Image: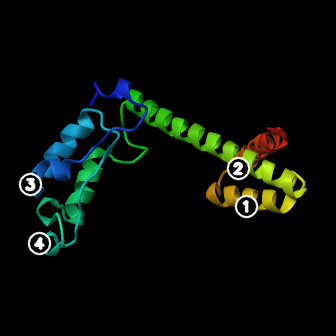
Amino acid sequence: MLAARPLTHLPIVADPSHAAGRADLVEGLARAAWAAGADGLIVEVHDDPARALSDGEQALVPARFQELSRALALHPDARLPLAQLRAWVDSIDHDLALLVQRRLEVAKVIGNSKRQTGRAVLDPRREAAVRRTYMEALPGSRELADRLVDLLIKAARDQQSIDD
């Protein structure tokens, strides 16, 4: 896994369930993949593997999966090595940058549409709706939500003001 890291910006995800094919091997493979630096794991879970319509033989029951999750500390506040935490943040930052770029591309199309139909670039109702979305998504960070929306709206307006 470490050898693949420089070859891609994408997260490296391991699938110990399908690799093992048997539930009794899944935990060991999951631990090995996580220790080798996997960004994520795909683990089959079923409340009654014997009755699963597919992949039951490789599925963990929820209690075993929960134990595995705890053992691997699969949550952001885990005691992971700093390099792994930073790699996680880098991956998230990359995804955010791509989403912002896509948002700006769509904003430009919207700007072209507004110009063709004679509509103003500024749309206070739409901007208020965007602001509400961010406030709901970041309930404990009103100032951050405001600053993000301000930056995104300014960037969108700039895109919408550019003539092709």
- In space, the residues marked 2 and 4 are separated at their CA atoms by 47 Å
Q: Is residue 143 visible?
A: no
Q: Secondary structure at mark 2?
A: helix
Q: To which residue does mark 3 refer?
A: 24
* Residue that numbered label 2 is attached to: 145
Q: Residue at x 88, y 52 (%)?
A: 122
Front-lying residue, 58 or 72: 58
Q: Which mark is residue 132?
A: 1
Query: Quadrant location of the N terminus?
Result: top left
> In terms of sequence position, does the residue under pointer 1 or pointer 4 come before the other?
4
Q: Earlier in the sequence, mark 3 or mark 2?
A: 3
Q: Are marks 3 and 1 in contact (CB under 8 Å)?
A: no
Report if the CB atoms under discs 2 and 1 are less than 8 Å apart: no
Dot placed on the residue nearer the N-terminal end, 3 or 4 = 3
Position of 68 with respect to 104 (left or right) is left
Q: Amino acid at mark 1?
A: Arg
> Going 43% across and 44% down the picture, which residue do you hit?
77
Q: Which residue is mark 4?
A: 50
